Every structure is written in C-alpha cells, then in structure tokens.
Amino acid sequence: MSAAGDGEDGAAAAAADTLVLEITEAAASPSSAPPPLPIPVSALAAPLPSATVLAVRADRSRLVESSSYFRALLGGSFSESGSGYVRISCDLAAAVQVLRYLFEPPGSFPISHHNFLPLLEGALFLAVESLLADCERWFRTVRSRNSSMVVPLDFIIETWYFAQKHGVTFVEDVCPGYLAQNFVQVISSRSFVHIPYDLLCSTIESPHLTVDSEKQLCEAILSWISASRQSCEQSVSNSADNQLSLLSKVRVCLLPLGFAAGTKRNCFEFGNNAVCMILNLLKDSLQTLLYTVTDDNLDSYRIRLTEYSKKIVLSGCPQLTTQFLYISALPTDLDAVFKRTIVSDVNDGCFNHYNGLVKKAKTLSFRNVRIVDLSKCPNVHFGAAILWMKWAFPELRTFIASYCLLFQFEDLQYLLLRCPWINEINLSIDTSVILSKYSIISSRSEVRRDMNQNLSSYYMQSGLYGTSVNPVFSNISKLILEGRNDITDMNLLEISMLKSSLCYINIKHCTLLTDDDSFSYHKDEHAHVMAFRLQELHLEGCEDGALCNFVGSSLEYLDISETVVSMVSLAPVIRRNSNLSCLKTAGCRNLLFEQGEVQSTSGNKYGRFLQEITSTCYLEDVEMGWAFCPVRVDDLIPSFSKVRRMTVGLGTTLPENILHALPEICPFLESLVLRFQVISDRVVRNLLESSTNLQVLCLHYCLGSLTSFSFQTMAPALRILRLQWVTPWITNDDLTILTQNCNLVELSLSGCKLLDSSSQEIISSGWPNLACLQLEECGQITLDGVDSILDCKALEEVLLRHTGRGIGRTIITDAIRELPLLRKLALDLCDASEGGYDTPNVPEGKMMRSVRMSRCKKSAAAGRSCFGEAPPSSSIPKPVQHRETIVLEWSSRQLTTTVVEERL
C-alpha cells in the first residue's frame, strides 16, 4: 500500500471518528435559527459565541471512553450511534467545562471553586466517572487543609443546595466539617445568616466545631435566628422549633454570666434558664461534675477544644473551676474511674495523679492554641491551671487573667517556669481607690484566710516556691500588672531580669513599689537603649524631665495626663514618633505656656505641638485638655479622620458646629466623653443617629438645653451611657424609652431626682446584663431596698449614693453573695435604713476589690437632711458635704480598712 493511500485511509478514519456535538441550553426556548458553525474543542477556552446553543467538533472515541452517557448514546441502538451530528440538551456551561476537562492536556485544567459546580453538574449529567472522582478528591482536599477558609462561604452554601438536590453524598459529608473547623471565620461572613438550617445544625454537631468560646457560638446562633425571623419568606426549615433546637446545642453552663443575662432581652426563657444553671453551678460544681463523670455524660461541660483551636476565651465565667479545664482536655477513651479521680484531685490544690494523666494523655495536645483568657474566673485554681496549660497548649503565647484578685506573684513565677514560651501576660486588676494625695485618718490590715490557697503542693513539692525567674527560659515581651498593690520592690527586681526580652511593662498603681535605689548594683548602664523599642509610655504624675530624656521613636501610645509636661518637651517626641496613634494630654496645663527657649533643630524651631500632630500623626485615641484651647479644631480635622476614642475636657471648648459634625470628622468614632462642654438636643441626637459605631457616650457637667428628645432614637451599638449632672428631667418613662432604644452594659446617672423605687425594676428588666450601675442623687430609687438591683446578676460595679434611705444593714454581704462578679461597691451611709452597714471580715466572693462607705457632715442648720433639702426657714438648698469615707480594700494577701477625709 502506497504512502499516499495510507494517508487517505488515515484521514478518512479520523473523519469517521469525529462528530459535531450540538449543545442546547436546557432552559432555552425552541428556536428556528440555523444551527451554529462548529468550533474545535480548543476554542472552548475563549468566550462562547452564543449563550444558548453551541456546536463543537469532538473525538467520538474519547467521548465514548470517558462517559457512560456518550457510551450509551453513541455506541448503542440509538439513532445517534452512527450519526456525525449529535444534538443534546443540558446546562451549556456545565457541558463546556466537561469537554475542556476531557480534551485539554492533563494538569492544564485545574479544579477550583470557580468551576467546581459546573464540572460536577456536567459530570453527573454526562456520567463522566473520572471527573466525578476528581471532583470528590478536590472537595475533600479543601476540607483536609489547615483551619483557614480557602473557598468562599457563598460557594459552600450553593454547593450544599446542589448536593441536596442531586444526592451528592460526598458534598453533604464534607461541608459540615469544613464549616465547623473554620467556624470563627464563617460567622464573620455576611453570608453566615444565609446558611440553611440543616447545614448549620450539622456544622454545630460536628466534632470539629472550632470556636473561641461558647459565647461566640451562642452569638452566632442568635444572629442567625434573628435574621431568620426578619426574613419575608419563612420556610419550614426555619421554624420556631428548629430555632430552639439550635439553641439547645449551646453548652449554657460555659456561657459568661453577663452574656447569659443579656440574652434575656430577646430570648427570655433561654437566658433565664442559662442564668439559673450558672448560679446553680456556683453553689456546687464539684458534685455536679462528679455525678456527670459517673454517668459518662461530660459533653455539656466540656470546653470546645479541637486541633484547629487558636484561642480559648473563658472570661466572665465565675462558675468555671479548674475541673472544667481538665475534663475538656481529657481523652474520651479514658475510663470513668480515672476521670473521677482527676476531677477530685484537681479540687483545691491536691494533684497527685498529674504525671499519670500526662502519661495517659501524652498524645493529646492542642498545638495551634496561642491565647488563653481566664479573666474574671475567680474559682480557677491557678496552680492547676498553669499545669493544664503546660500539658495541653505547648505553643501558648498569650495568657490573660485580668481581674483575678487571688493570682499572686508566686503564681507568676510558676507560670514563667512551667510555660517559658509565653511572651505576653496580662494580670491587671482594679486600681486602688486611695491615692497618695488623700488625707488618711487611720488604716489597718489583716491577712486573708484564703491567701495561701495557691501556695500548695504545686509549688512546695516541686521545689519552685521562692525560686527567682530564670531569664534564660523567659521570652516575656509584654507584662501588665496594673493595680497589683501586692507587688513589691523585690518582685520588681526579679521581673527586671527579663530586660533582654521585655519591651512593655505596665506597673501603674502598683502602690507598694517605691523609688528605692538599694538595688543599684543590678542596673545596666545601657538600659536606656530599651527605650528605642518601647511602643507605649505612661508618665502619669511625672516631671517634665522624664519626657525630655526620652529618645525613643517607636511610640504608638503616649499618656502624659495630669503632668507638668510642656510643649517644648512634647513637640520633639511627637515629631520623632510618626506611628503615634494615642495621645492623652488631659490636665496638662503647662502645655499652654512656653518654658524657656524653644530648642532648634536644623534651623527650624519646634512649633506648638498641635501643629506637630497635624503634620505627623493620624490619631485613633485622643484626650484633649488645656492645650487645645488656643487652636481651631478645624485645623486638626485631617489628623482626626481615624479617631475611634475621643475625650474633651476642661480647658477645651468645641463649638456646636464641630460637635454636630463629629460623625463626619470621625467616621469611626466608638467612644466620646465630653466634660464641661455646651451641648444640645441637635448634637446628641445627631451623634446617636449618625455615629453608627458609637458604643460609649459620656456627658459630664455639660451645659445646654437637653430634653428627652435627645434619646428618643434607636442606638443599637451604644453600650455605655454616663449622664452626670446633665439630665435632671429624666423620669421613669424616659428610662423605659432608653431600655427600648439601646442595650446598655453600663449606666451612670447623677442628679436625676425625679426617679423613684419603680426605676429599679425598669433598669433591671430592661438591661439584665448590666455590668456597671452608678446612681447618685437620683431621687428615692432605693427607698424600698435594692432587691431589683440585685437581680442584675452580671453587675461588677455598683455605686448608690443619696438614692433613698432604704438600704439594709446586710447590703455588703448580700451583694457579694448575690452578684458573683461584683468587684466594686460604693455606698453612702445616708441611705442606710438602720444607720449603718455590717462589714464582713472575710467575704464569700473572691472577686471583691473594694467597698467604699461615705459619711456626710452634719449640717449646722437645724433639721437639714443630708439630701441637700433646705430647712423650712430657707428656700435655697445647700450642696451636700462629706466628712469621710471608709474604704475596705482587698488584695491577694490582705484586707485593708482605711478612713480618709475625702469622699471617694
């Protein structure tokens, strides 16, 4: 056979094996138009010439080999089996993707979330088994990647609906687990509220569900339910029963008390049950857990820990004990007897089986966890908690235990020795209410009975008690000890050994610290070099020279409030630190004056520091005082475009047009504090309506003509409202409107004399999640006692002064017992129904920081009461004066009782 003949036969064979495949969009209407011109498969990568019909030249054998659909259509008894022109009707985009997959070179056509659904749909319709396998392989690979979303949530939702419609089981298997391991990112997506009920339910039930806290999960469910209720089309799957089913999956015993109380506003039954369960756990959590271990039903009490967890936030859970921490990290296959032993062992500092636990659970650790927050968890035993962190979180970097009064310096030493990889620690507590400027009449201290509870076998048996921090094993870069008035000079010396790594330390209000120089032999002559690394600097109460000697250029936060710092020293600091985002200058009167000659640099003199701010900084947090008085605020607008927190105090007056324009000047404004400013309904109303991010509004001693109209608008973001001596007209009706318009966690009212005992119920029922309540000179609110106030179980701070003579003698012990998170209580002896209050020697609560009781001076005018009422012979009331304040203040070691002349 000649070569030419072979060529002709080969061409004929190739032609016989090629067909034209006409694909019509399944949803398209019939058309009388002539058939389109065929294009080669290679042209499918370009934009399609038609949206409804397409003709493609394709290899018949390749189609038959790859697809059961074409195998039956082209190789069977159908009329198309011998035809060179075949018509099919299906999804055009899906068919195009399948043809590209079949005919393009391997590896040149990867699967992604952009083409997955068309490929899957085409593979199902055309029965391309290899493509189905590749689609499943790709989708499962997405699920197996690390905990970071690699495909959009919209794609997952669309794929879920498709899979349900077409019975694609592998998609239904993968989606819940994928969303579960990435749940923290999922709930931040706008599409979260569009997740179908069955998918959300399966996600929450997944063992891979990863959340920072149970609160985060509950917030997400409530958000989804709220959006579902607002939907115009309520489907059966989003019924009330299904919504309650979602809430039933929340482990309510792990919710923060304040958050649980807050859910009563919109889900009263759920919130009330949650609060009751938390309060019951506070009474006896040990027996509850022991019974649960026996029944092998610990899931409701387990903190959610998975291999994908990065952050564990347990803040605000007074019901949480160390047992909760350990049972959450125990392997599920441990026998109940050993679990019960562990629960009993951890209780109150005796842990003889720790080594056995580590041995049995040595493979169980959560290496992705970087942050643990145990703030406001007074019933956690920190010695055991530190061992728990050492065992469970070998990569932990940040530990937070703020407002944990019983955490002692020995615990800090133990933490640094057991977990040397930690680099940030926050142990701040409420600062002392007694300052050095106060006149102290008397003071005495007594040791707490529970002071040594942490200095148990954890330290004594390991020989670590009294051991200094070893700098070789410590990487601490940030240490916050604010308010710790049990930290001594010797403790600070031991901390100073960390200077090679430490670049931030906050020892503000650590009142036991002195300026003793007896440890001078430890000083490093090059220590000033560390200033270059400092990012925050607090100089409250310091002299001007302290700032003049500062040479750093990395500052982001500068607080010189109430100092004698001058413009001369401040201006160069601002110029050198272009990253400065926080500047607090309230009370700095010397900024108004020139002190000495202004220093020159390169022939240019430093101008006023305000000009430096304008040309250098974009502030996010600013406190303005005297120095802002001579300059037009308009000039600062460019620097204020990123401000989130602003305080304007005495010495600066913002005109009404600037106050009204603040939502435009500061579009990200979250907190606004105005002192001694002139305000109006127009200003306040505009702030609440236009500053959509505003969470904090404080008006102190402001002038103007405010009326109830100011607050008759919705402010869903507002959480803190302080109205001190600006709204004397407030009535119970106004309070009711406020409860409807905003969800507060802090309320402070002063001078609202129209309020009465009914106001308590309005406040407690309207804001059940209040954390701070301050009422001063507010009519007769407490004339009938404080029962409704004590119903706000999340209260952390309470101030009641001149609110009605109806507070019983046992108020202090009652408040400590009824309010598990209470840290600060301030009372006035004028309000005592029996002339005074009983003071406890040892409080039941472990959170309590201070109790203040003020006593009024007796008036010389006969018959005059302490409530500022005028005697019959006078028509002008006189201001109330106070003789002294009795302060009970607890530290981790002792109770101090102090009497000062001032009213605190």
Image: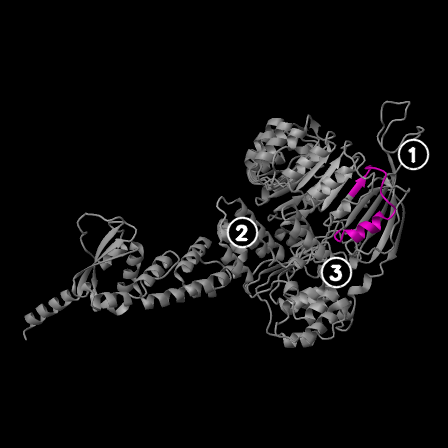
Q: What element does badge 3 sit on?
A: loop
How packed mark 3 is, by other alpha carbons closer than 10 Å (few <14, some 14-19, many 20 or more), is some
The quadrant holding residue 745 is: top right
Name the amino acid, label 1: Lys
Horizontal side, residue 599 vs residue 128: left or right = right
Q: Which residue is mark 1?
A: 858
The quadrant holding residue 863 is: top right
Q: Which residue is mark 3?
A: 379
Query: What quarter of the picture does the C terminus occupy?
Result: top right
Counting from the top left corner in percent of width and height, residue 324 is at 68, 64
Name the amino acid, label 2: Ser
Q: What element does badge 2 sit on?
A: loop
Q: Which residue is mark 2?
A: 239
| Numbered badge on residue 581 | none
Horizontal side, residue 344 vs residue 213: left or right = right
Residue mark closest to the camera, 3 vs 2: 2
How packed mark 1 is, by other alpha carbons closer than 10 Å (few <14, some 14-19, many 20 or more), is some
Q: Image height check: is 297 above or below 372? A: below
Horizontal side, residue 887 vs residue 118: left or right = right
Q: Please provide the residue range marked out in magenta.
A: 799-821
Counting from the top left corner in percent of width and height, residue 673 is at 67, 37
Cα gap from disc 3 to disc 1, whole angstroms: 43 Å
Q: Is residue 803 magenta?
A: yes
